[in-house]
Amino acid sequence: MKKEQILSLEYGDKHAKIMFIGEGPGADEDIQGEPFVGKAGQLMNKAFEYIGIDRSKVYIANIVKCRPPGNRDPEEDEASACMDYLRNQVILIKPKIIVLLGRIALQHILGPEYKITASRGKWFDKKGIKYMPTWHPSAVLRDENKKLYFIRDLLMVLQKERTLQ
């Protein structure tokens, strides 16, 4: 993948108060050069629309910038190779809230001891940033029972953002 393609796999307002971090690009994201444009992204967009989050006013990034072969989970060395880039994104954007979408984002940002089922829907504070782990939209697509929790988590993010203004 060319450097300019990697750089295009981010999206949003460079002054966003809310940043979403996912796992990595899928096939649709590779083709379109934008995160969360496939089925998971469409679900996320519907959730945003439903609760009143303007996608153009948030920032969306991923742990890894290139899709792992076979769309498998990123290996530790792949994630490590991208972490400085992601840290710099966070430094430049200066979000007040980071939404961690799924297990991979949660464990690479807060630590491997965190489990998504136990952590989702709870606030964590680290270096002045509020973190909200929630289900990855692809997990919601696989299990409809997670949809309500996903929406509730996003509503808590929206409410928290309003109190931080």
Image (spheres, rainbow, N blue to C red):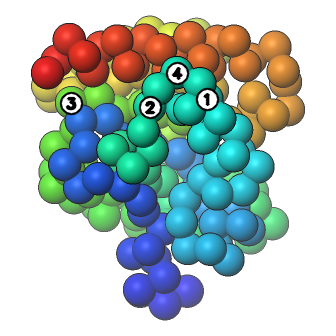
Q: CA distance from mark 3 to mark 1?
A: 21 Å
Question: Is residue 39 toward the left or the right of residue 159 in the image?
Answer: right
Q: CA distance from mark 4 to mark 3?
A: 19 Å
Q: CA distance from mark 1 to mark 2?
A: 8 Å
Q: Position of residue 164 (x, y in %)?
A: 16, 18
Report which residue position mark 1 lands on. Answer: 47
Mark 2 touching mark 4, by CB under 8 A?
yes
Q: Secondary structure at mark 2?
A: loop
Q: Position of residue 148 (x, y in %)?
A: 69, 12
Is tag 4's residue or tag 3's residue first in the polypeptide sequence? 4
Q: CA distance from mark 4 to mark 1?
A: 6 Å
Q: Secondary structure at mark 1?
A: helix
Q: Secondary structure at mark 3?
A: loop
Question: What residue type is disc 3 on?
Answer: Lys
Q: Tell me, for residue 95, which label it has, or none.
A: none
Q: Tell me, for residue 53, which label it has, or none.
A: 2
Question: Is residue 75 toward the left or the right of residue 108 in the image?
Answer: right
For the N terminus, the quadrant is bottom right
Q: Secondary structure at mark 4?
A: helix
Q: Counting other residues with Cα less than 10 Å from the Cα at mark 1, is it few (<14), some (14-19), or many (20 or more)?
A: some
Viewer-nearest of discs 3 and 1 = 1
In front here: 149 or 53? 53
Is tag 1's residue or tag 2's residue first in the polypeptide sequence? 1
Residue drawn where x is 31% and y is 35% of the image: 18
Report which residue position mark 3 lands on. Answer: 96
Q: Position of residue 48 (x, y in %)?
A: 54, 32
Question: Is residue 30 toward the left or the right of residue 1 in the image?
Answer: right
Mark 1 touching mark 2, by CB under 8 A?
yes
Q: Counting other residues with Cα less than 10 Å from the Cα at mark 2, is it few (<14), some (14-19), or many (20 or more)?
A: some
Q: Position of residue 38 (x, y in %)?
A: 72, 56
Q: CA distance from mark 2 to mark 4?
A: 6 Å
Report which residue position mark 4 lands on. Answer: 51
